[in-house]
Amino acid sequence: MTDLKIELFYTLAYIIRMDYDNITTVPWRHWDDHINHINFRNYLANKLNLDITIQIGWYSISSKDIINNKGSGLLNGKYNGRTIEFLKGVFPEFIWYPWLFDTPLKNFWNDLEIQKQYMEWLSNKFKWTSKKDYYKLSGKLLKENYGSGLYNKYNSLINLVNNVIGSPPEGDDEWYPWIFDGSTTNGYWQSIDNQKKYMKWLTNKLQLKTLKDYYKLTGRIICDNFGSGLFTLYYNGSVIQMVSSLNDKPPEDDNEWYPWLFDGSTPNDYWKSTNNQKKYMDWLANKLGWTTKKDYYKITNKILNDNNGISLLNHSKTIINLITTVIGSPPEGDDEWYPWLFEGCTPNNYWKSIDNQKKYIKWLYKQLNFKKLEDWYTVDQNTFRDNYGSGLVLSKIYNSSHIALLQTVYQDKYEFYPWLFKQSPQGFWKVEENRKKYMKLLSIILDCKTVNDWYKISAKDIVEHNGGGLLHQYYNDKYINMIKILNPHLIFEDHKFNCYKTESKLEKWIIDHKLSYKKQISICKGKKNGTFKIDFLLTDLNIVIELDGAQHFRQVYRWLDPLLQTKRDVYKMFVMLKKGYKCIRLLQEEVYDNDESWLDTYLLPHCIQSKTLEPIYITTIETHMSIYDTHKTLFSDDNISVDDLYINDKESDEESDEDFEDLQKQIDNI
């Protein structure tokens, strides 16, 4: 048959299409024409109910499907018996992947190019763009994506990527087995070299620059960074065991790796060991620069918390128990560790025990270097506050009264008189028995046995013996009334008291010189209904004479601050000047100590000759020459107004206790 005839035959075959169902044997050289391959494909599609435009369905055919449908000669003669080669021949427009066939193809995983093709296909499917994405590989993922045969060939992901992908991701020295999910081979972590390799990798990943940075490690961090198998199986979930085993030495300045510095990593029951507790306390003292046992009193819950030791209290319960157990004997000079010296660590209900109260008072007595019990009179609430006793004094037990505390503790040894303290308790003088007790003690101290003895007493004596508050609050500073009321069994004559001698001497001098006068009269009103009184007014001469006692120049208990008293004096002088009166000021001490000739020499000339209204200050004692300097400065200062000088009248009968307390606060602030 000529070539022309053969060509004509093939053309007719294509046109006529061979009916493979009705032939027993495919004609000779039928498969030499590729057109017949295509015709057979179409025939096979019809037989197997497949669509030639949809590739995925063709992955279901096998060599048996081809052979049973008259395609044996085509498959074996033209495609070496390989179904995939047949499909490539009849579907050149498609790319065929051997792993997608339902019927496994033989030995195709032995071909490295196919392995690479598969990895590329897998990468495209999951949109992996870098080599690091291959760490997402797992046996499960390969099995679910037709790659179980490839996985079985290499028996591990690390072997697979080393052979198929080749070099590791940029920045990595190699492919790291632990990053592949569950892919470390059995026995991999038994090698200490592999463990150290992991620790080196973790160090770089977490940018741990120094050995101390390893304290930042936690079990969670290790597990989140693919080290759970190593961590749990080989180190029993202990960060410190893992870190200490994989590092040759601890951080500089540390004797060892300290468990408490690993976040939440202190082993169970670690603190049950007293040696471990002591190890921690030694470390803490060294860190905080504590050099003596007394320094341990600085310890607080916050310090423990800030220094990773708060879990220690789960065992010791309280700081005092911790210190007593771990540090042992108290600081030198102390009988024991005192709970009140630990900030906020005094146990609940500790102060309810009278023995504990006595213990504290004994300690404070020694702390304040007291020599005798009377030294307690120098203390106030601030003393206890500054010496760790505010919790005791301010408790409901003593209702903020340190005096009540001392009376309770020393009730069998010593009687404390509340008025001898810096401030007597609030409301103390309201009790009549307390007032009588004070007067009885005063009579003993001043040796007042008769009426004549009391005549020698002055307000100064009462104030200097801590009775100023009583005198002011309950007797309006009238000490004679106080003496008479609290000594009802005695009969007194007012004019015989010493306080009247100075006024009497001046009054007699005025009478002897036939000068018209008035005494103890109100010269002006204050701003709160009170009045300011003057000692003497020479009515014909428009001269005011003031007798100044010690309270005008130095602090006298329960009196105004001297500066405030001086301002009040100057205020009164301004008012006198406005009313046309001249003021002459004398010292009570000098009038009392001299006879009437002294008044003739120093007072009389100012009463007769002086025409100016400027104040006159008379004193002849050299040490007293500067005593009126503040009066003079304030009176002559043009920048000071009368309102600047105003001080509420202390002598006002209507002044309340609240006014007095406010005034005392003002004085205390100054």
Image: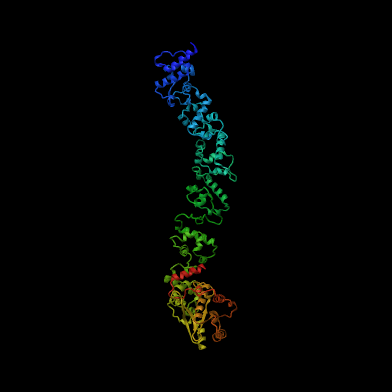
Q: Is residue 643 above or below residue 281?
A: below
> Which is nearer the eye, 10 or 579?
10
Q: Is residue 253 above or below residue 444?
A: above
* Colour pattern: rainbow
> Which is nearer the eye, 593 or 586?
586
Q: Position of residue 599 (x, y in %)?
A: 55, 84
Q: Position of residue 361 (x, y in %)?
A: 50, 61
> Which is nearer the eye, 380 or 638?
638
Q: Position of residue 287 (x, y in %)?
A: 57, 49
Query: Which residue is painted at 52% across and 24% down in the image?
Result: 111
Query: Which residue is painted at 50% across and 63% down in the image?
Result: 382
Residue 625 visible to the viewer: yes
Residue 555 visible to the viewer: no
- Tally of numbered discs: 0
Q: Position of residue 200 (x, y in %)?
A: 57, 38
In the figure, is residue 47 to the left or right of 222?
left
